[in-house]
Amino acid sequence: MTDQGSQVARKNMTQNVSHAICQKALDALDVDRSIAFLQKLVRCKSYSATDGERALVQSLVDDMSRLGLEASLTPVPGGRYNAIGCLPGTGGGRSLLFNGHVDTNPVTEGWTVDPWGGLVDDTFIYGIGVSNMKAGDAAYFCALETLMAAGIRLKGDVLLSYVVGELQGGVGTKALIDQGVRADCFINSEPTDLEILTLHAAAFVFEIRVQGDTRHLSKREEGTDALAIAALMVSDLNSMAFSGQLSERHGSVNRVHVGTMKAGLGSTFEDWRPAQVADVAELRGSGRYAVGQGEEGARADMERLLDVYRERYPTAKITFRIQGSDGHPVMPPFAERETAPVVEAVAFAYAYVRGHEAGNGQAHPSRFYGTDAGHLQHYGQMEGVVCGPGGRFNTMPDERVELIDYLDMIRIYMLAIMEICGVSDEK
C-alpha cells in the first residue's frame, strides 16, 4: 500500500482491525484459485428459470458447504431456488449479508469469444454475466474463503446469498426477505466499477398499447396509424423526468427508456401485409425514479403525457400499465447515508487497497440501475451499500471484467468483512 493509501486508510479506519491483521488477510489471497472459481461460475449457463440456473445455485450450496458454512437451497416462487450460506461468528460483532444474483442476460450478436468459455487473458476475464454479476458473486465467496484460510475468526455472522430472479424484478431477494433472512447490514455486489453506490433509482417496466384503425395505404388518411403514433411517443417518453424530486441529487436518477416496439395488424402483430396501416402497436420500456417520488407519481406523470396523445388522436385507444400486475415486483429505490457504518467500512477497505478514496454517492451509470439493494433496504429494513467489480463492459458483446478489479474487490470485501464483523483473537 502507498504512503498516501496508508494516510487515507488511517483517516477512515475505526480501529476495529489492526494493520497486521489486514496484511495477514491480504497476503493469504490465492489469485489463481480465485480466478478459477470465477471461471467456473461463468461456464455455467444460468439463464433465468432454467436447469442451468438450478445447477449453479446447487453448485454454490455445495461450495459453501465444503467451506464449512451452514448452506442450503431456499425456495423462490415459480419452482426456483436461492442458495444461502452462513458462517456463524464467535459473538459480539455485527452481522453482514452479501447479496448477488446468478441469472444472466441473454447472449446477443457480436461476440468474438465463447460467452460461456471463461476466457482469461493478461487483462480481462470474459463471459456472459461475468460483469452482471458473477464477478461480484465470486468475489465475496473468495473473500470469505481467504479469511478462513488465513485462520481469521470473526465475531459477527457472515451470510452469503446467491439469488435468482433479479432480472424479473428481484423475486429471489424478495423471497429471501419474506423468509426472514436478515443481518445488521448488507453489501450488494452489482457492478459499480468498485465505486461506492449509495443512491440509485427504483426500476419498473411499463407497456403502452396503441390501438388504431387499419386502411389500405391508398386510404391511409381515413385510418388511425398505431405505428406512427407510437413512434412519435418514443422521444417524448425518453426525455421525461418525474415530478416530486427531493433534490437535484435525487433527480439525477430519473430516466425513462423505451426498449422495444412492435406493430402490425391485429393483436398478433401480423407483418406480412405492409401495404396496410398498422392498427396495433406496443411499446415496452423501463422507468427510473428516486426515493421520495414513487410509483404512483411516476404513473401519473406518464398518464399525463399519454393524455396529450389521447387528445391529439381521439380515434386511437391508448392504454398503459406497469409490470407489477404480472407478478413481478417493482424494484424500490435505494438511498443510504454516506456516513452509514457499512459505507464507511467499504470506504476504508477501498482506500487501504487502492491508496485513494473511492467515489461515493450516485455514481454514473450505476445510479440508473435497479438492484436488489432496494428490496433489502425497503422490505428488509437493513442499511447497506452497492459495490462490485465490473460495469464498464456490462451488457455488451464480449462482456468482461478487468482482473485487477476483480482481485481488488476480493481484497476490499475481506477488509470490509473484518471491519464490520470484528476479528476474534487477533494474533
Image: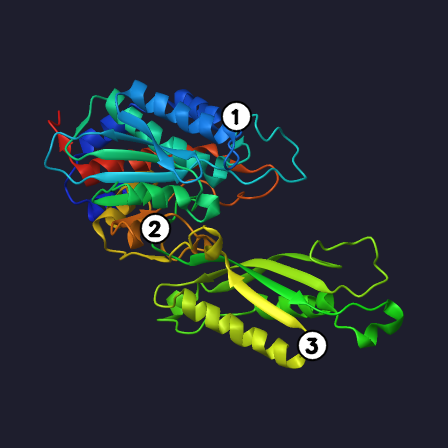
Q: Nearer the viewer, residue 317 or 251?
A: 317
Q: Residue furthest top?
A: 66
Q: Dot 1 surroundings within 10 Å: few (below 14), some, or many (20 or more)?
A: some
Q: Earlier in the sequence, mark 2 or mark 3?
A: 3
Q: Secondary structure at mark 2?
A: helix
- Quadrant of the rendering where the N terminus is positioned: top left
Which residue type carries mark 2? His
Q: Secondary structure at mark 3?
A: loop
Q: Earlier in the sequence, mark 2 or mark 1?
A: 1
With respect to residue 264, does 137 lie above or below? above
- What residue is pinned by disc 1? 43
Which residue type carries mark 1? Arg
Left or right relative to 117: residue 156: left
- What residue is pinned by disc 3? 315
Mark 2 or 1, closer to the camera: 2
Picture colour scheme: rainbow
At 42% across and 24% down in the image, what residue appears? 37
Distance in Å between CA atoms under marks 2 and 1:
29 Å
- What residue is pinned by disc 2? 375
At 81% across and 76% down in the image, what residue appears? 222
- Quadrant of the image occupied by residue 231: bottom right
Q: Secondary structure at mark 1?
A: loop
Distance in Å between CA atoms under marks 2 and 3:
41 Å
